[in-house]
Amino acid sequence: MNEKVGIVSLGCAKNQVDAEMLLYTLRQNGFELVNDPADADAVIVNTCGFIESAKQESINEIIELGELKREGKIKAIIVTGCLAERYQSDIAKQLYEVDAAIGIGANKRIAEVVREALSGKKVEEFPDKLLLPLEGGRVQSTPFYTAYLKIAEGCDNRCTYCAIPMIRGGFRSRPIEALIDEAKGLAARGVRELNVIAQDTTRYGTDLYGEPSLDRLLRELCKIDGLHWIRVLYCYPDSITDGLIDVIAQEEKIVKYIDLPLQHCNGEILRRMNRRGDRASLTALLNKLRSRIPGIVLRTTFITGFPGETEEQFEELAEFADEIRFERLGCFAYSQEEDTPAASMPDQVDDDVKNRRAELIMDKQQRIMEEYGEAMIGAELEVLVEGFDRLSGCWFGRSRADAPEVDGCVFFTGENRPTIGEFVTVTVDDILGCDLMGTVV
């Protein structure tokens, strides 16, 4: 009987794609894949190590799986991903439940590592992170109609608060031909929504082709039969080219939605973050996007309480958010990450102050999003059907304005039963918090 393996993948969508590649390798090597860790012989925890809360989530997951191991329900726990790459041998030393801790460069050896762990061998393996496979098969873990396409690995931006370059290495683009082949395979399996991701999607191609090539890639993706929505996530404001703006505006398949993690608007704070720009230049960029791409939905993230952030600089950020009125926004208190330049900067901001500032931004954003929803009443939206909510008695899905797992939903009713994964047209009748409610046309 084949040994059973389950996987728990934490953190971002980029990490989820790595997990899907791990699952494919395991299946190809004769393992049986199971969804419930309690049914597995071995469980892989694909960890996140980006900020303190994510690290703690990963540690808690390992500890909970340790309980299953003590109860005899599972035999081995294998840890990989960003937390393992970042802390390496400390993982097994501090978490006695762990049988194997491997860096991301060892992911291609996952089948052998699992077998060694199941045989009772303690495994610690941390080869060069650049050995992480960028190409290979995947076992899709998202719903059949939506998938992520990771177009690059690593990052060269070196923001002073961020450990990603240290964990994942430098920026490495995948060839356009490989990405088109993968996207065609996903479309052939029923994927209708393709979400394009990387640590910085706008840098795509600079290492391979000598210039930003995201616009070129997107035009090729738009030619693939079966894909209905193509969404671009994680763009860097400095690298938004006119060519990229044009392709988003002109191509019908590309949803008019762009994720621009700006982090702040004050010029001095951005300089200390090792980012460029200021409130005036960012405002000009956002106005340009709205002018050139009518109806575009802008998503961003902010960091409050970065070292040295004064009350006046925070007020500037709050005013900027109020002025721009982003359709989608997340705000997080600064996380002091060891071995990053910002961690040793003077004038670290008190946790209570950081959190209060983030809450103030999000309280105001809640009102902005409610007003955005109210302005949508009476509009007709194309909605991707995702399921049925028994509590409300409504179907639900997402519009073009809603990225999977991070944005809201559209709840709707209708005379006919829709099919999950199809697109329906919904007239918006009301709002429910930041979600919309409507009726199928």
Image (cartoon, rainbow, N blue to C red):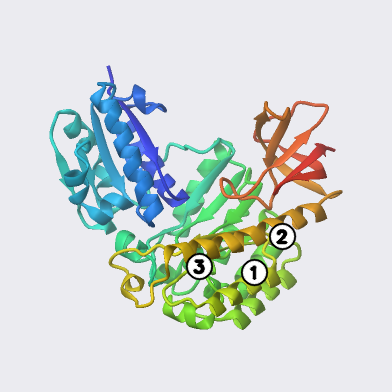
Q: Is residue 206 left or right of 284 when viewed as pictured?
A: left
Q: Is residue 183 left or right of residue 26?
A: right
In the picture, the disc for residue 321 is: 1
For the residues marked 2 and 1, what is the alpha-carbon distance in whole angstroms? 10 Å
Q: Position of residue 188 (x, y in %)?
A: 56, 38
Q: Earlier in the sequence, mark 2 or mark 3?
A: 3
Q: CA distance from mark 1 to mark 3?
A: 12 Å
Question: Residue 99 is drawn in which quadrant?
Answer: top left
User: On screen, 255 above or below 347?
Assistant: above
- Tell which of 243 and 178 is nearer to you: 243
Quadrant, the N terminus = top left
Residue under label 3: 304
Q: Earlier in the sequence, mark 1 or mark 3?
A: 3
Task: Give whichever of 187, 353 is nearer the camera.
Answer: 353
* Image vertical order of residue 86 relative to residue 44, above or below: below
**Element carrying mark 1:** helix
Q: Is residue 219 left or right of residue 34?
A: right
Disc 1 marks a residue whose amino acid type is Ala
Looking at the image, do the residues carrying marks 2 and 1 touch, with CB atoms under 8 Å apart? yes
Categorize mark 3 by other alpha carbons within 10 Å: few (<14), some (14-19), many (20+): many
Measure how far apart labels 2 and 3 are at the Cα level: 19 Å
Judging from the image, what secondary structure is the residue with disc 3 in?
A: strand
